[in-house]
Image (cartoon, rainbow, N blue to C red):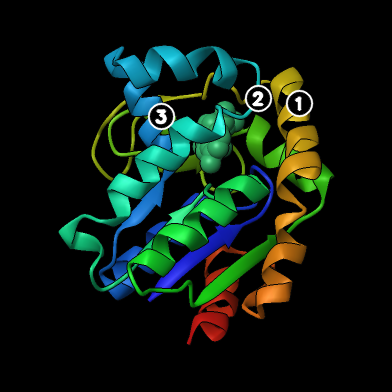
Amino acid sequence: MRLILLGPPGAGKGTQAKKLKDKFFIPQISTGDILRRAVKDNSELGIQARSFMDIGQLVPDDLVISLIKERIKKADCEEGFILDGFPRTIIQAEKLSETLNEMGLVIDTVVDLVVDAKEVISRLAGRSTCQDCGGMFHVQSCPPKVEGVCDNCGGNLAQRQDDNSETILKRLDVYQESTAPLKQFYMRQGNLKTVTARGSVEEIFSRVLEMVK
Ligand code: AMP
């Protein structure tokens, strides 16, 4: 099963991708997580990506395209994968189709998580993320049992560098301009499914499952 999760920042792509991964035993491939790891490690990729990420801009297409091309060819992707945060531009989507085509594969379903901007801003502003496992918490809707400590692995929770109000607004603009046009792209390919991303994580997950079955 090869899936793409689309939607603005804060729509719950990461949360739903993790649940899909646990249910179907296929990897979650988050370009955001891969890039944040690279920044933390101060690798060549991280050094190139950091200045874009800090201001809520997209990292250049060629960097993310080459990392995804390598990643989806790995053995653990044979039974499928969940793309979370990729593609983000039409060029990325075209290159992904090309690469899959060469491998004799296709994307089965693109799930578009729909949520309004006001909800997104409140979700992101109250979000904290585990520095070790990437687990996500929210000050109101999903507080950790112990403040600042991840329930899953005991790692430290911190607000993401780009979850401040100025950068959130920039990321939403970038989404509208560069990523929202992907809905038309996948609608034309006939595999776009729309899911209302309001309500509890479990409610949203059951809607997602209906679409990917
Ligand atoms: P995310 O965790 O998906 O919200 O991504 C965090 C940041 O990483 C984004 O604001 C971008 O700067 C960068 N990023 C993640 N995925 C991509 C992508 N597919 N294309 C370009 N930049 C990306």
Marked residue nearer the N-terminal end (3 or 1): 3
Percent across and percent down for residue 115 are 76, 56
Residue situated furthest front in the rendering: 102
Percent across and percent down for residue 205 are 53, 71
The residues bearing labels 3 and 2 have C-alpha atoms spaced at a distance of: 13 Å
The residues bearing labels 3 and 1 have C-alpha atoms spaced at a distance of: 18 Å
Is the CB atom of the residue marked by disc 3 within 8 angstroms of ligand 1's nearest atom? yes
Q: Of 171 and 147, which appears nearest the observer?
A: 171
Give the residue drawn at x 61%, y 29%. 58
Read off the residue under disc 3.
35
Ligand 1's image quarter is top right
Q: In the rendered image, which quarter contains the N terminus?
A: bottom left
Read off the residue under disc 1.
170
Disc 3 residue type (three-letter)? Leu
Q: Is residue 35 left or right of residue 170?
A: left
Q: Is residue 67 left or right of residue 165?
A: left
Disc 2 residue type (three-letter)? Gln
Percent across and percent down for residue 47 are 40, 12
The residues bearing labels 2 and 1 have C-alpha atoms spaced at a distance of: 7 Å
Is residue 144 visible in the rendered image? The answer is no
The secondary structure type at the circle numbered 2 is loop
Is the CB atom of the residue marked by disc 2 within 8 angstroms of ligand 1's nearest atom? yes
The secondary structure type at the circle numbered 1 is helix
Read off the residue under disc 2.
57
Residue 99, placed above or below residue 23: above
Asked whether disc 3 touches disc 2, contact meaning CB atoms under 8 Å apart, the reply is: no
Q: Is residue 102 left or right of residue 16?
A: left
Asked whether disc 2 touches disc 1, contact meaning CB atoms under 8 Å apart, the reply is: yes
